[in-house]
């Protein structure tokens, strides 16, 4: 009888857990869906490549959705059992709280063990595949980043095109703005075939603007190349605002270093396995380089993996003691607990990023808080 009871509670909880995975995954994936559908419908990326991008993005979504789904599944399942008086019937038959809780706790521990491997190794590998495939698509279709009559940002540059032709990778009625940066210098060439004929038009110590009738675009891993036709280059003289340098050209080759190179420093952490992050942290410590971001990424993988154990400890007593309207209470409590958990997580992230508290301590705040609340409720339930 006990074995059948264990299987029954697991079956009820697992069904609700799968429903939670579906619901939360859909919520998290909406941003990806809109972007991926746009790639397919508007920007000419094949359906197969879009599907691959979706598959590579899914693990990153699941590492967030699974812990929430554990909480949701247990509260809904045990809330239903409580609402239908099945909990009362089980207790009348001599079934204690340990028998009611133990199979679910074991199942959740198995899920957490899987998440440890998933978060530390599988999810980073899939993130890396996602980024590499997206870069490959950008190289083949460089105008994916561009939208007609919209200003886009590439590092220190702002670009505007009145019309975008993705078939021949050409922008029309183009404006390129460069804002002041005293560190870098760029060189332009007066036609596509010229190797060394530099005009030294782009001294980055001043802001400047290029306007042209059209520009052909080629994308590379380290940046984007523009072959610009029939335009002019302008640079203001800040010591004499009425004196402006103005040069016209028939053709001009211009290269923008990829802004992604800078942004990928954050992205690359999500692509590294945890052993690689630990090596990075060790190297940063030896060279006296800040490593807080790497440390946060490392510990957040642990807290997401072990969050289901915290959630099961608080969900079981709430679900068992729910009584009438158990499913409604379970649904409401799951949203409330998730809200509190992520508020505490945001607080922990802020404190660790500002280095007020070491990341290896403060990042555990949400898990410890929820676990402590769960243990208190569990103790209260057992004594009742």
Image (spheres, rainbow, N blue to C red):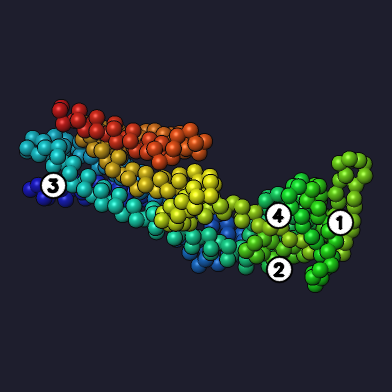
What numbered label is drawn on residue 5?
3
Q: CA distance from mark 3 to mark 4?
A: 62 Å
Report which residue position mark 1 lands on: 232
Report which residue position mark 4 lands on: 148
Query: Would residue 202 be found to the left or right of residue 135 on screen?
Result: right
Query: Which residue sits at x=79%, y=60%?
Result: 187
Query: Which residue sits at x=44%, y=37%?
Result: 358
Q: Position of residue 351 (x, y in %)?
A: 47, 34
Residue sticking out furthest to the bottom: 193
The answer to which of marks 1 and 3 sits earlier in the sequence is 3
Q: How many marks?
A: 4
The answer to which of marks 2 and 4 sits earlier in the sequence is 4
Q: CA distance from mark 2 to mark 1?
A: 23 Å
In terms of depth relative to the viewer, which is nearer, 172 or 374? 374
**Mark 1–mark 3 contact, CB under 8 Å?**
no
Mark 1 neighbour density, 10 Å: few (under 14) some (14–19) many (20 or more): some
Query: Which residue sits at x=58%, y=57%?
Result: 38
Between disc 1 and disc 3, the foreground one is 1
The answer to which of marks 2 and 1 sits earlier in the sequence is 2
Query: Would residue 76 be found to the left or right of residue 348 on screen?
Result: left
């Amino acid at each position: 009888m006990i074995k059948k009871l264990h299987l029954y509670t697991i079956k009820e909880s697992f069904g609700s857990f799968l429903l939670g995975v579906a619901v939360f995954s859909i919520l998290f994936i909406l941003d990806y869906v809109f972007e991926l559908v746009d790639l397919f419908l508007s920007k000419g990326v094949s359906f197969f490549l879009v599907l691959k991008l979706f598959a590579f993005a899914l693990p990153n979504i699941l590492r967030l959705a699974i812990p929430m789904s554990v909480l949701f599944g247990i509260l809904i399942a045990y809330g239903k059992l409580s609402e239908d008086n099945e909990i009362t019937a089980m207790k009348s038959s001599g079934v204690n709280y340990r028998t009611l809780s133990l199979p679910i706790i074991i199942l959740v521990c198995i899920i957490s063990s899987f998440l440890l491997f998933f978060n530390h190794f599988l999810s980073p590998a899939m993130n890396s595949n996602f980024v590499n495939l997206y870069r490959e698509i950008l190289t083949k279709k460089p105008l994916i980043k561009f939208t007609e009559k919209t200003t886009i940002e590439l590092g220190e540059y702002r670009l505007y095109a009145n019309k975008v032709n993705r078939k021949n990778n050409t922008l029309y009625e183009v404006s390129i703005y460069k804002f002041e940066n005293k560190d870098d210098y760029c060189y332009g060439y007066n036609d596509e075939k010229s190797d060394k004929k530099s005009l030294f038009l782009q001294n980055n110590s001043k802001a400047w603007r290029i306007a042209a009738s059209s520009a052909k675009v080629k994308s590379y891993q380290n940046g984007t190349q523009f072959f610009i036709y029939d335009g002019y280059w302008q640079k203001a003289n800040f010591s004499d605002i009425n004196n402006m340098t103005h040069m016209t050209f028939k053709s001009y080759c211009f290269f923008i270093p990829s802004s992604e190179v800078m942004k990928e420093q954050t992205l690359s952490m999500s692509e590294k396995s945890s052993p690689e992050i630990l090596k990075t942290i060790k190297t940063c410590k030896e060279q006296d380089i800040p490593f807080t971001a790497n440390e946060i990424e490392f510990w957040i993988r642990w807290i997401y993996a072990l969050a289901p154990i915290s959630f099961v400890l608080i969900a079981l007593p709430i679900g068992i003691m729910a009584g009438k309207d158990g499913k409604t209470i379970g649904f409401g409590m799951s949203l409330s607990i998730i809200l509190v958990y992520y508020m505490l997580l945001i607080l922990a992230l802020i404190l660790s990023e500002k280095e007020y508290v070491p990341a290896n301590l403060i990042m555990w705040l949400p898990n410890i808080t929820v676990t402590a609340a769960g243990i208190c409720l569990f103790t209260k339930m057992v004594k009742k």
